[in-house]
Every structure is written in structure tokens, then in C-alpha cells.
Image (tube, rainbow, N blue to C red):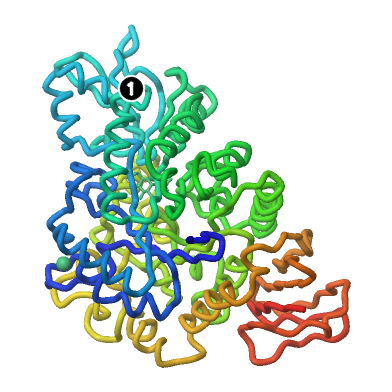
Amino acid sequence: MADFRKSVVYQIYPKSFYDTNGDGLGDLKGVTEKLDYIKELGVDYIWMTPFFVSPQNDNGYDVEDYYNIDPRYGTMEDFEELSREADKRGIRLMLDMVFNHTSSRHEWFRKALEGDPKYKNYYIFKKGKENGGPPTNWESKFGGNAWEYVEKFDEYYLHLFDVSQPDLNWDNEEVRCEIQKVVKFWMAKGVKGFRFDVINLISKDKFEDDYEGDGRRFYTDGPNIHRYLQELNEATFGTDAEIITVGEMSSTTMENCYQYANEDGKELSMVFSFHHLKVDFMGNEKWVIVPFDFLKLKNILFDWQTHMAEHHAWNAVFWCNHDQPRVVSRFGNEKKYWKESAKMLAASIHCLRGTPYIYQGEELGMTNAGFTDISQYKDVESLNHFRILQEKGLSQENAYQILQIHSRDNSRTPMQWTAGENGGFTEGKPWIEVNKNCSTINARAELADDTSVFAFYKKLVQLRKDYDIIAYGTFEPKAEKNLSIFAYKRYYKGKELLVINNFYGIQTRWDAGEDLTAYECLLGNYDQQDTCGTEVVLKPYETMILYK
Ligand code: TEU
Ligand code: CA
């Protein structure tokens, strides 16, 4: 049986992974072709972001048909081939299910707009305020009000994301049955994992104006959320012990995650939470430039580590995904200590208690996009906020600086396979520009170099297989107040693991408070570890995984 605690998941954004037919878009055949590469890394699961039929306003997170594959990505035969080939290599597939909303082109929404009452009740239509204007002041995550007016009904529909992504009405039992059907369909195809997109937003509470925020407190971790998840679990994936699930939890609370990801298995296997990735925001506002708050980052991760364990709940641990900037550009130093910091960040997260996720290209140390012109950006959120920032009075130059740091396109530039044209991603014109640094950062070069970032990730994945302490050990925070060191211990069956990371480019000294000579170093990013008695001197961005 699959033990998700001993597994590592590799995330693929198919559009930017590998293009086999020269149309500039990655495709399913491209994933199949690169399976040996993924196998080489040693991961157990591939999470594929949505490849279902979609107008692609939000790169597939706007699903038009849950049962069919977007022809741009390939055919059902291509999917079945991918599934078979992955299986041969012992790799399982995890699909990305977007059930908070559909595309406005989904048949259900089209029928709703035609006035069919059955389908209108699949979505959330409301009258506006008596004095005019939308039902509530809630904001869409992609900017602007979250309600769209439909003249024909003199009503508004809710869209927490783009206007082309109407929210489904989970309070309608028929909707919940439709969702169950979709999950069962893909289970029957042999899928062994599901990631559920913004799943904690499906149960809406009161439809009231929010005078304190953007409305999220009225729909996040809502009143029926646990009931709906338990129901979905019982009716679908809960019947197959081999299936693993992860919920993407937007602005969630830890208390709710104790239940979402409890080992009682009633809801999900694990959760993505994002609090540690808001340490370079101002509150919830991401369209600002502030240096990341290291102490906050550390405290948040340590809190989740400690309390989730106390409540028998399991984390997904990660730095990167298709919505986040590249971690080496964000918390590392891509210019001066690119390799050192990429490895340090990898080790610091992979030895935590949780299932690690690697986002395509992270294992190569890929960096932010470096785009300088709006024509290079493709993401709906980036394009909207570029406009909104300037409407708020920011200069264009300023708006560009913010995008360069926070845009989701930073992680969506194509995989860098070779130093050749377009990084070997496509023989056509890529849908989004390839990062120029593919000449030095690319898979071919790194596969041939046993000191590469790739080689380091591969070792980390293997360590999880070789040392049960990484998967099962208890967690203890260290150096909590230290301003540059991120250190922790794990304990399991009389063994101890001590992970020490320097998050900065300045050498630093730390007293571990215990004899370090008793440890052996399992993995580090420098040839030599400078320890003496209880003291260690950490070089710039140094990491060491010590074991006794
Ligand atoms: O993202 C959920 C989400 O709210 C964010 O990660 C979002 O991109 C960010 O808060 C905006 O600042 C999921 C998907 O991962 C994302 O790609 C989709 O766009 C979104 O849901 C809608 O389906
Ligand atoms: Ca293609």
C-alpha cells in the first residue's frame, strides 16, 4: 500500500513541461516522453495540473468538461498511455480537481444562463442590493468585485476567481452528486491521487458585506465544509486505501486543518497551507514589495509542524508551485549563491514532518522569469493587477517591479531541458517565453554533474526512502529566536536527525547545545562541515543533515 508519508510528489504544469508537436504548448505526450527523467529523480507521484477541456482563461483552472481532455494537451489515449508508462516505472498519477467553480463555458453554466432553474441552482445567483450594486462587497482573488451582473435575470452570480469561473453551489445536493461522478470516473481510469483546488472555499456562509476584509471570512472553511469533504470521501476515494489526496487550503486555519488532514482518514490525506508563503506580503496584500520576514517564516513552519503533529494531522511541505515565485529567487540568492541557496532551501523543507512536493524546475534551481514588458506576461491575475496597481496611482515602473517579484508567471516559464533554443522545450514558439538562463540552468547539464541542484534533490528523495526518521520522526524546533539559522531535530526509535540551515549569505556560528561529534553528516552543500564540540560554523547558505 502506498504510504504517503514516505512518498515525494512531483508537480507538473503540463503547458510548460514539454511540447512534442511544435505548437508551443506542452502536452501529455511530453510528460510521457520525460518519464525517465522523473524516474531518475526518484519521486513516487506526479501531480498534474488540470488538462481537461477548458478555454484556458486561467490555464485550465476553468474547466469546461471534467470528462474529456483538452485537445491542446492530447487525447484520452494519450492519457491512458501516460498512465500505463508511469505505472511501469512505479509512478502514480495525481489529478487536479477544480470543484469550487467551473468555466462559464461549462454546459451547466450555459444552461443556467439560458434560465434553466435546475442549472441556475448549480451556481450562486443573488439579487443585488436594494439601492443597486452587487449583493456583497466581496473581492475576487483576481481583482475587482466578486459578483457579475446578468441583465436577463437582474441578478448577479458569484465568482471568487475570474469572471469566467462561476462558483458552484455545493449546498445543492445535485452538485455534490455530479462531483462524485467525476471523481469516480477518474478513479476508474486508475488514478491514485487527487489534489482538490481551493477546496476549503466550497461552503459559503452568510452573504454579507465584509467591513473588515475582502469577504474571505464568509466563505473560507465554511459551515458545511467538513460534512461535504467527509461525504465526498465516503462516496469516492475513501473506498480505495491506495488513493492519496491533498486539499489546497486557501487562507485556512490550523484548527480546521487538524480535521481536514487527520490520520483518522475521514477527509483528506494532507493539506497545502500558505501562511509561510505570505511572509513577503503586507497582511494578505501580495502586490507590494517587502523583504521576507525570516523569523515569521520560521515560526509559522514550526507552529504547523508542532501542532499538526499534536493533533495527528499531516502536512504537505513545499516552497513552490505554479502560483508561487521561484524559491531560489524568493528566499535564496539567485545571483551570488544560486547553487548553495537552492540546495539549502531544498534540504530545509524535505526533512520536515510532511510529504514534500517538488514543482517542475525547482529540482534544477530554476529562477524567476525576469520579464520586463507586460507583453511577456500571460497570467490573468498578473494582467489584472498590473492594471489595478496603476489605477491606484502607482507608476508603471513600480507596477513592473511588483510583478517581477510576485507574478505567478515566474514559475510558469517552460522547463529548461537543454541549453539549446527555447531550452529544448519546443521546436515552435513557446506560449510563454523561456528564461534566458537556460544556457546555464538546464536538465542536460545538471544530469551530467554530480554536484548539481538536481543531484542534490535526488539524494534528498532517496534519504526519505533510506531513513524512516525523515518520514516518521517527531519534530522539535531549534534556535527559534536565531535571526539566520533554521534548525530542527527529528526523533525516531532511538535515532536523531539534526538539520541545520543558514538562510543568509553571511557566515554564522551556532552553539547546538549538544556534542556534534557524535553525528555523521548524511548530506550537505559544502564538502566539509565545520563543527567543533557543540559549535558549528555555517558558511553562506550552508545546510547539513546530521544523524546519529
Ligand atoms: O489557487 C488558489 C489561490 O487562491 C491562489 O494560489 C491564487 O493564485 C493566489 O491567491 C492569488 O494571489 C488555485 C490554483 O492553484 C490557481 O492556479 C487557480 O488560479 C485558482 O485556484 C483558481 O482555480
Ligand atoms: Ca504541444
Decide if residue 389 is on the left or right side of residue 211. left
Left or right position of 53 against 293? left
The residue at 37%/56% (across/down) is 192
Q: Which amino acid does label 1 sit on?
A: Asn
- Pick the residue in front: 389 or 379: 379
170 versus 82 height, above or below: above
Residue 398 locus on image (x, y percent): 41, 54
Q: What residue is at 23 percent from the left and 22 percent from the top?
A: 149
Q: Which residue is drawn at 66% across and 47% down?
A: 312
Ligand 2 shows up in the quarter that is bottom left
Judge whether 295 appears above or below 122 on screen: below
Question: In the displayed structure, does residue 418 sit left or right of residue 427?
Answer: right
Q: Where is residue 85 in the image (x, y as percent from the top left)?
A: 27, 71
Q: Mark 1 points at which residue?
A: 172
Residue 448 visible in the current orientation: yes
For the point 59% across and 43% down, which residue is it?
264
Give the number of callouts. Answer: 1
Of residues 34 and 285, the one nearer the viewer is 34
